[in-house]
Image (cartoon, rainbow, N blue to C red):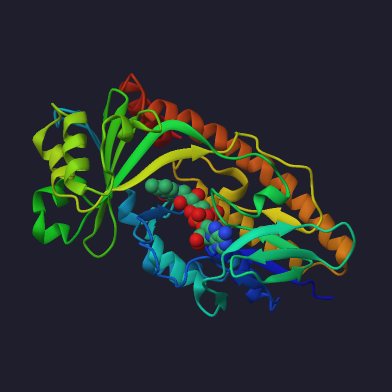
Amino acid sequence: MRQRIAVVGSGPAGLTFARVLHRHGYPVTIFERDTAPDARPPGGTLDLQEGLGQLALDKAGLLAEFQALSRPEGQAMRILDTDGTVLRDWQARPDDRANPEIDRAQLRDLLLGPLDVQWGRAVTEVVVPKGTGGVLVQFADGGQEAFDLVVGADGAWSRVRPAVSSVTPHYTGVTYLETSLDDVDTRHPDLARLIGDGSVAVYGVNRALVAQRNSGGHAKVYAQFRAPLDWHTDLDLDLADAEAVRSSLLALFDGWAAPVLDLLRHGTAFVHRPLHVLPVSHTWAHTPGVTLLGDAAHLMPPLGAGANLAMLEGAELAESIDTVGGPEELDEVVRAFEERMWARAGRWASITTAGLERLVSPDPSEALAVFDRVQSS
Ligand SMILES: Cc1cc2nc3c(=O)[nH]c(=O)nc-3n(C[C@H](O)[C@H](O)[C@H](O)COP(=O)(O)OP(=O)(O)OC[C@H]3O[C@@H](n4cnc5c(N)ncnc54)[C@H](O)[C@@H]3O)c2cc1C
């Protein structure tokens, strides 16, 4: 018997979940707050790991399409000292498929394919009634609908999470300011060479600059630093004023090599991303009819794991649901899925939390040590 399944959120977690169910012919309703796929800038590039995000795409029947779109050369990594000296310069072998990069928009379109998303349907709350009849999803437009299982894949500030957990994300003490370079090969050839095919990173005391090539001649630059959450109010800085943000960042990174600072000088608008996380081993008392995936369940520092885990969880939960008969069986597979997710996500949350401490740290040699350990493993 088919259960009524809804997923809230069409990020990597929600779309992978829905796509794998769709592949098995299992109906699923997808609610998304954004009014269209391109309603917001999609963000930068994601590296998808062989045993995680790529495994999820395989379960969705999309691995060959991913391989055609992704950029293995994007795994290249160069590390500079703040004076511009090259400390490490690592290139991936052409056949290295461990962590190829893909633009978020390309991944979203790949996963969306034939899926029917209800755009512009912001969920405000999920209510688990005492009796039978299903879990209620309530919407900003005042409507509500009932389901046998509601999957919260609605990211860091999930509106589904309060149905199972009272925990909310806390600030890590590290803030990113993200900017973009467009048409980098023709407009900024020196920066294109600096960034190379993949990423360039420069680590200083409690701050870092990282630039990553995206497809189509675009690049993203992330200024990363330790600061109180309200650092900009102390400086009376309007975050919407790109020139004021640029001046403030150039002052923060004063003394760094001129070609490195050019990454900030030529960036377009700046997006403020204070990094929040959930506690490393976030779990909850199993609640029949509701579960969480991805950032909604285990928001962690952005060090290459979040989307990968989100996608694999989506694929695994969908495959488990495809095997169930009645409601008791559904509850059993969700419970087993949660145990597996918590154990794996807890391991990655520990790794990425320690990683963030060392990458944006008082001792920049810590960052090099992280890179060297990853390369030798
Ligand atoms: C700068 C940066 C770089 C990163 N790089 C990587 C990387 O290289 N590799 C990697 O694995 N991870 C990376 N991550 C982490 C990754 O982006 C996240 O872990 C991943 O996007 C989580 O996916 P998700 O589907 O759980 O949530 P999200 O991507 O946040 O998607 C949630 C969706 O839910 C929707 N939504 C939210 N609220 C509601 C609501 N109330 N009603 C309906 N819909 C709602 C949102 O609009 C959104 O579409 C990075 C993160 C950052 C910030």
Q: How many marks?
A: 0
Q: Is residue 16 left or right of residue 225?
A: right
Question: Can residue 2 be seen in the rendering of this structure?
Answer: yes
- Does residue 10 sit above or below 172 in this rendering? below
Q: Is residue 194 left or right of residue 376?
A: left
Q: Is residue 94 left or right of residue 341?
A: left
- Does residue 45 sit above or below 62 in this rendering? above
Q: Position of residue 244 (x, y in %)?
A: 18, 42
Which residue lies at the image location 58% right of the left edge and 38% below the top edge?
278
Q: Position of residue 28 (x, y in %)?
A: 67, 73
For this rendering, which residue is in front, 47 or 129? Answer: 129
Which residue lies at the image location 59% right of the left edge and 50% below the top edge?
296
Q: Position of residue 223 (x, y in %)?
A: 28, 39
- When asked about the image quadrant of residue 204, the answer is top left
Which residue lies at the image location 26% right of the left edge and 43% below the top edge?
238
Which residue lies at the image location 42% right of the left edge and 55% below the top edge?
97
Q: Position of residue 154 (x, y in %)?
A: 57, 57
